[in-house]
Amino acid sequence: MSTTTAVVRKNTYYDSVSLMSVSTKANALDGVDQAFTAMGTEMNKGVLDNLGLLTDELKAAESGDLMIVLVAEDGADTQALLAGIEDLLTRKAPASAGGGEVTYRTITSAAEGIDGANLAVIAVNGAYAAREARKALDSGLHVMMFSDNVAVEDEIALKQLAHDKGLFMMGPDCGTAIINNVALCFGNKVRPGNVGIVAASGTGSQEVSVRVHALGGGISQLIGTGGRDLSEQVGGIMMVDGIRALAADPATDVIVLVSKPPAPSVEKKVLAEVAAAGKPVVVWFIDGSEEAVTAAGGHFAAGSLQAARTAVELAGVEQGPAGTFDAEAAAQAVVASLAEGQKYVRGLFCGGTLCDETMYAVRDAGLDVWSNIQKNADFRLPAGSASRGHTFLDFGDDDFTNGRPHPMIDPALRIERIVEEAKDPEVAALVMDFVLGFGSHEDPVGTTLPAIQEAQRIAAEAGRHLEVVAYVLGTDLDSPSVAAQSDALRAAGVTVTLSSTETGQFAREIAKKAQA
Amino acid sequence: MGQAASGGSGGTRTARVESGDAELLDRLHAFTGHGAVHSVFTRVVNLLTPQGTLIALAARDAGDAPRTLVVDVADWTDLELVPGQRVTFATGNLCVELPHRTVRLTTADARRWRARPPSLAHLAPGALAAAADHLDRLNRTYGPRGGMLGATPYAGPMETAVAQALDEGRTTLIAAVRDGRDAAIRRGILALLGLGPGLTPAGDDFLTGVAVLAALPGSALTGFGPALKAVLAEHPGRTTDLSHATLTEAADARVRHELVDVLRELAHGRHPQELNAPARELLAIGHTSGSDTLSGLIAGLHLEEELRGSL
């Protein structure tokens, strides 16, 4: 039998985001049946009363008091659980400098105060980011700017200033970098090695880095440029500087470039750098063409897996035998279990490049695909719209993230959509990604599995089999590991693919056969 | 604290107020004596004035709101402020006294922000309905569950019970505003006031959305404002201090800038798509606060449409 325990903290205030986060984490503690934190208003106490949870202590709470209500499982140590919940709350308290840590109030003072500091990561509101970046560059620091919504004029000026000073200006909107084996923002724990990456695509570069790692290779540096760097206006300033830096880096033997196809004038400039690099350069311009890359002496890659394989091969690393995934046979087995009318694939992605790679694989089979990131405006689907036919949504696109955390941190929107899609009798398969690594959600699979199971239940009750396909981007060194997350998915009946490219192949074959 | 807080002699630092609620700036000189820190968050510090009024100091990213001064600091974390700390209000400036230093805020160059949105009286009932429908679609697409939009998919019994009570409270309130009788509206307000786990409970956020509409010149929701003011006066402990202050201001059509921006766009009467950007900013407030406020605004717009049509 469960026991109810309550604590009232007098005059204690936490913002609603913190309270919700603490409640979620508290409910996940072993031994907790239910945990709830709320202000001690009359109405909230009334709800607790109706549930039979209103203890004498809670009755005395006032509207400025925080109520912590714990319903523990039989035999659980309630005091230890309460201490655990209190600890979660304490961790949410505003941080203060202490324990020998020094908090610097300005970038300039940090640059002066930290001996040997040479890089600043800027993640403030876009309206202030350029100002802070300029101070960092003026203090002799390289900059990685996670912030977005920075004016393109500021981006150009900052990149030009960095170039003139011999510094990197990675970003704005740069989500991933690995510098001297340290992953910054969204990055994965990968083996050090001799493959260097310059990328205008965050999850694209993550995918190449984890594939290189899985194939036995390692990463020397991963330099992010920000998604707008290869536009006509910005002119690829950072991509060019990145290629030159890796060309001069003795620890880098092979360079990989990852980007959506650049503006034509910028492509010419970048490919001239490829020709002059003096090292093999693998070029994965997502949905790009082979001819110009080959003419410049580069190694063209049609997908992320090919980019990683070519790089590892050129780096002289002995690879194990290539996988023998038979997408066609696997899809045939799936389609055999579908009911009449189930014909569409719905892709629900956190990573933009992962979404692109799968979407283009389906499109290249001659099928219509709808997406919020479709280049073809006729097939563009605004973020709030219901799915149509084969739909691929990038929940990390600005349309979905404006004012919300990135889905790699907070997957709530996608979780709701998983259940919605399962109600559509025309859906044959749901395809999704899970991105592990520094900066990402600590358990993306665990937080999404209940929705997947709900989706499977909805389909089963309607007499349908719903194929759920998932790719986990990560390494054995990440925490949680790719193996642990994949095992949890498999245990729930999810088909786990082993790369972004393989995910695209599988989705394409299901779409072709289901629609036939 | 941000770089704008400059060093000074005798352990005193100066921080510039970038902008402030114009009505608060006008009244600031009247607050003399000692107040106290009420509550501390990363980007907002709430203070009690010597007269017991709750006001807020916001970091520069937090934005304008009623009773708020926006200060040129990144956040408040490094000051180690704690509730109950003494604050001195003197004519022309405001000092926060800490054990080892004093932080003085200067308001001389502060931009004066006006919290009042424009009237919607010129909009036809059909335009109100179209705007409400569009905002509702945005809210259901982008708004998080856990408040007025219902419980999250795997909610426990407590969240489910709160969501159910919120839904019932909304139904009661809408019926009461349609009914128009003061006693019914008061009951409707009391069915929501203080309901929800957060610092500004979801029920209060919903009431804020209705209250601001009702307080605009030309509104057809005539009975709501007086009823809300009466309930707040008669039941001061029914909700949190912060939420009580927010509702008190909303009853006078004074709301934070994200909601003002939505109402300004509504007043333009342009295509509903133009509401997308300000509505998304509103939805980004708190966990469900923005969505709950938008839910109240949507309910209020539908009521406006109905009640204007019945005139």
Image (spheres, coloured by chain):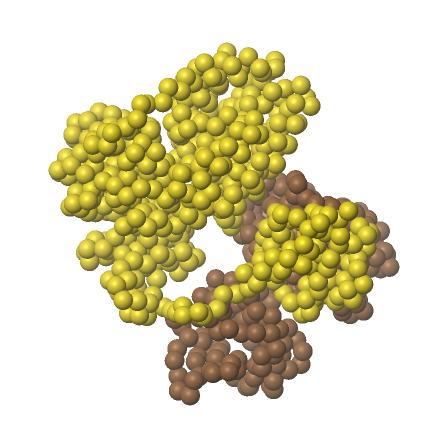
Chain colours: A yellow, B brown
Image point (19%, 55%), residue name: A166
Q: Is residue A419 found left or right of A251 in the rendered image?
A: right
> Which quarter of the figure has residue A41?
bottom right
Image point (39%, 38%), residue name: A475
Is residue B125 in view from this perspective?
Answer: no
Q: Is residue A279 found left or right of A416 in the rendered image?
A: left
Q: Position of residue B276 (x, y in %)?
A: 54, 45
In the rendered view, tell whether residue A346 sits above or below residue B254: above
Q: Where is residue B285 in the image (x, y as percent from the top left)?
A: 57, 55
Is residue A90 in view from this perspective?
Answer: yes
Q: Position of residue A270 (x, y in %)?
A: 21, 38
Depth check: A89 or B15 in front? A89
> Which quarter of the figure has residue A140?
bottom left
In the rendered view, tell whether residue A340 sits above or below residue A389: above
Depth check: A246 or A479 in front? A479
Image point (40%, 38%), residue name: A476
Depth check: B291 or A410 in front? A410
Q: Position of residue A514 (x, y in %)?
A: 52, 15
